[in-house]
Amino acid sequence: MKKKLLKIALFLPILGFSYEMNFNKSFSKNVNSDILVSNVNITVVKQDEKSVNSEIEKFNNFLKNTKYITIENMNYNLTPKYEYVNNKSIFKGYIGDSRFSIKSEDATNINKFLNDLVELKDSLKSNDLKLNISNLSWELSNKLQNKVIDELRLESLIWVENYARELSQKVSKKCEVKNVNINEDYGYITPKNRMLSVSMDSVSTSFINTDISPLNSEQNIKINTNYILDCK
């Protein structure tokens, strides 16, 4: 009788054995960027302040009438220009510097805007006017980024529920999800897109009339998830 009781006592810890699983898993999705962005810089150098402002105002009117793209972060500075000759500062006029950024979901609209901008610049026939376009590249909008992250969160939750059911069958225990921690500091890999930076002070309109938008390659968005499962 004592031997039987001993055998039962030895089996009880095994039958009641439970364990906790703690592991990580990543979820990712490849998406195309949806916003084409660029920075524009217009520089005017004239002898007097009025002439500089008059030239810049022509571009401002053009920007005000442009409704098919987003124009933001506009900034204008007017500063005196000096040259040093024989250790003396000589006044040479004024420099007007207008900067802004442009963006659109449609690359055609960006190309149209740049075409129109260069045509305006050429129509002024001024040697004191410089137009610079830089960092033309594709980016992920916050809207698309958040949408993909929400999809990945849902995918991670569905996956772990299915995994817990499958694990329960294989180990003959009831495995339940105890905790899920999704890393909010997600990251996405920025592709090496072709980025355009060009000074337009000597570029002809025939050049800008071509499609200068960079290739829109895929970006990989990823979240890291930590799971804790309790099996008993």
Image: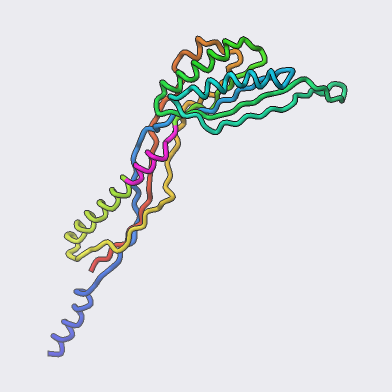
* Magenta highlight on residue 140: yes
Return the residue nearer the eye: 53 or 151. 53
Q: Indicate the quadrant containing the N terminus: top left, top right, bottom left or bottom right.
A: bottom left
Return the residue nearer the eye: 72 or 168. 72
Q: Is residue 182 left or right of residue 71?
A: left
What residue sits 45% from the left and 19% below the top? 111
* Magenta highlight on residue 77: no
Residue farthest toward the bottom in the current orientation of the protein: 2
What residue sits 66% from the left and 20% below the top? 44
Q: Position of residue 43 (x, y in %)?
A: 64, 22
What residue sits 54% from the left and 28% below the top? 39
Q: Position of residue 135 (x, y in %)?
A: 53, 28
Q: How many numbered marks are there?
A: 0
Q: Is residue 61 above or below residue 207?
A: below
Residue farthest toward the left in the current orientation of the protein: 1
Return the residue nearer the eye: 185 or 61. 61
Quadrant of residue 199 in the image?
top right
Q: Is residue 80 above or below residue 221?
A: above
Return the residue nearer the eye: 44 or 15. 44
Q: Position of residue 72 (x, y in %)?
A: 52, 32
What residue sits 46% from the left and 29% below the top? 70
Q: Is residue 5 left or right of residue 211?
A: left
Q: Is residue 146 left or right of residue 205?
A: left
Q: Is residue 167 above or below residue 200?
A: below
Q: What secondary structure is the magenta-colored segment mainly?
A: helix
Q: Which residues are magenta?
A: 139-150
Q: Indicate the quadrant containing the C terminus: top left, top right, bottom left or bottom right.
A: bottom left
Q: Is residue 119 above or below residue 30?
A: above
Colouring mode (rainbow / by chain / secondary structure / one colour): rainbow
